[in-house]
Amino acid sequence: MVLMDLRMPGGDGVEATELIGNEHPKVHVLVLVTYDTDTDILRAVEAGATGYLLKDTPRAELAEAVRTAARGETVLTGRLAGGLVTGMRRRAEPPVLSPREVEALLLATEGRTNAAIGRAPHISPTTVKTHLMRAYDKLGVGDRTAAVSQAIRRGLLLER
């Protein structure tokens, strides 16, 4: 039984979850996180996580979740289960990116920082980050590189 955080220094919890599942298929991974974004839930489950809980889960519920996951049974709270279903539906539908999301991704392909992306349209780096995070969620990915790759594969980024 492994308790996994998805955001770790020097590593990605989703990749670690997949590696554990491949190399030790009898080991169950229960993901504990401080946030509940649809993309992260879906990525963790696809990587083989047995369950997914928020770190603010009450102790008694967490203890029961660990026992349940150790038996190989799925553990998802109602709120997270809803997020998983939402994420799956979004992946089935073609994503529609806003013009700002497309612009941010196009400029990201040039290796620009959030501050540099925001200069031309005169928006803050925080607003750029918001546009990128929304694009990640719509594309079902967790980072800039994956978002750009996915958008190109789906024909959403056209040459300027």
Image (tube, grey):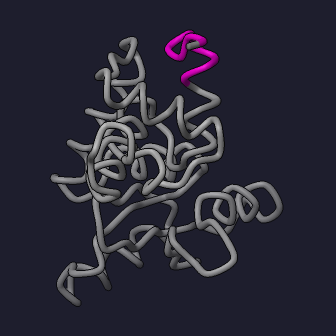
Is most of the magenta stretch helix, strand or loop? loop
Residue 85 x/y as whole percent: 28, 34
> Magenta span has 154?
yes
Residue at point 38%, 35% (across, down): 135
For the C terminus, which image quadrant?
Answer: top right
Furthest toward the bottom, the residue is: 59
**In the depicted view, which residue is nearer to us: 111 or 66?**
111
Residue 20 x/y as whole percent: 73, 65
Residue at point 63%, 66% (across, down): 12
**In the depicted view, which residue is nearer to us: 153 or 107?**
107
Residue 144 x/y as whole percent: 55, 46
Q: Is residue 43 above or below residue 110?
A: below
Residue 108 x/y as whole percent: 56, 40
Residue at point 43%, 40% (across, down): 136
* Quadrant in the rendering for residue 155: top right
**In the depicted view, which residue is nearer to us: 76 or 86?**
86
> Magenta span has 53?
no
Residue at point 61%, 39% (across, down): 146
* Quadrant in the rendering for residue 77: bottom left
Image position of 14 (left or right of 135):
right
* Quadrant in the rendering for residue 8: bottom right
Furthest toward the right, the residue is: 23
Q: Which residues are magenta?
A: 151-159
